[in-house]
Amino acid sequence: MASTDTAAHSEAGKLVDKAATPSDIRGRPAERAGSSRSFAAADVVLRFLLFASGVVAVVVMVTSKQTELIPIPIPPFLMPRPAKFTHSPAFIYFVAALSVAGFYGAITTLISLFALSKPAAYPRLLSHFVIFDVLLLGIVAAATGTAGGVAYIGLKGNSHVQWRKICDIYGEFCRHIGASIAVSLFGSVVLALLVLLSIYSLSKRIPKHSY
C-alpha cells in the first residue's frame, strides 16, 4: 500500500508541475495579442506593396505606345505604324488583372490598418483574406505568364512559324513591356508571401494540448 501511495503522489506531482500557473495563463493573451499585431503590421506592408506593384505595372503598360516608320511593299515609301498594348489580347488581360490586383491591394491595406487597432478581429479577417489571396495569385500569375510569352515572341521571334521579332524596331515599347512584366512578377511574389503569412498566422492560432 505504501508503494502505491508513493506512486500516486509522484504522478500527482508531475501533473501539478505540468499545470499552467496563473501568471502563465495571464501572459498568454498578451503574448497572442502581440503576435497578432506583428503579423498585422507585416500584412499591411505586403498589401501596400501589392497595391504599388499593381499600379506601377498598369501605368507602365498603358504608356507603352510607340510609333515608327515601317517600309511598305512599294519602296521607297514608309508608313507610320503604332505599337500599343491594345493590339494584343494578352496585354489587355494583363492590364485588367493587374488593375484588379491594385484595387484589391488598396482595399485590403485599409482593412489591415483597421486590424492593427483591433487585433482581436485579425484572425477572422485572415480566414477571408487567404481565400482571395490565393485566387488573385492565380489570376496575376496567369496574366504575367501570358504577357511574358507574347513579349518573348516580340523579343526573339519564332522562325518556325515565320513570326519575326519587333523589338529591334519598337525598342521603347518593348522596354515598357518588359518593365511592366517584371513589376507584375514582383507582385506575384508578394501575393505568395501574403498567402504563406496568412497560413502561418492561422496555424499559430490552433490550440496545442499537452498530455
Image: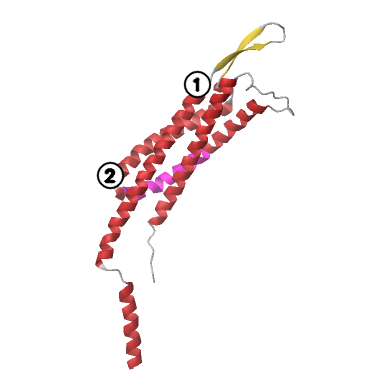
Amino acid carrying label 2: it is Ser
Under circle 2, the secondary element is: helix
Give the residue drawn at x 54%, y 38%: 141
Q: Is the magenta stretch mostly helix, strand or loop?
A: helix
Q: In this view, does 24 lie above or below 124?
A: below
In magenta segment, residue 114: no
Magenta stretch, residue numbers:
121-139
Question: Looking at the image, which is closer to me, 166 or 58?
Answer: 166
| Left or right of 30 on screen, residue 75 | right
Mark on residue 63? 1
Mark 1 / mark 2, whichever is N-terminal: 1
Give the residue drawn at x 31%, y 84%: 9
Q: Where does residue 167 sit, x and y in percent of width and height?
A: 62, 22
- Tell me the distance, in whole angstroms, between the alpha carbons under discs 1 and 2: 39 Å
Quadrant in which residue 6 is drawn: bottom left
Q: Where does residue 74 sit, x and y in percent of width and height?
A: 72, 7
Q: In this view, does 161 lie above or below 138?
A: above
Give the residue drawn at x 39%, y 36%: 48
The residue carrying mark 2 is: 117
| Left or right of 186 on screen, residue 27 | left
Q: Which residue lies furthest to the bottom in this view?
A: 1
Quadrant in which residue 148 is drawn: top right
Q: Which quadrant: the N terminus?
A: bottom left
Give the residue drawn at x 45%, y 42%: 133
Residue 104 visible to the viewer: no
Amino acid carrying label 1: it is Thr
Q: Where does residue 30 sit, x and y in percent of width and height?
A: 28, 56
Q: Do the residues labelled 1 and 2 touch (CB within 8 Å)?
A: no
Under circle 1, the secondary element is: loop
Residue 169 visible to the viewer: yes
| Mark 2: few/some/many CA within 10 Å (<14, 14-19, 20+) | few
Question: Looking at the image, which is closer to me, 35 or 202?
Answer: 35
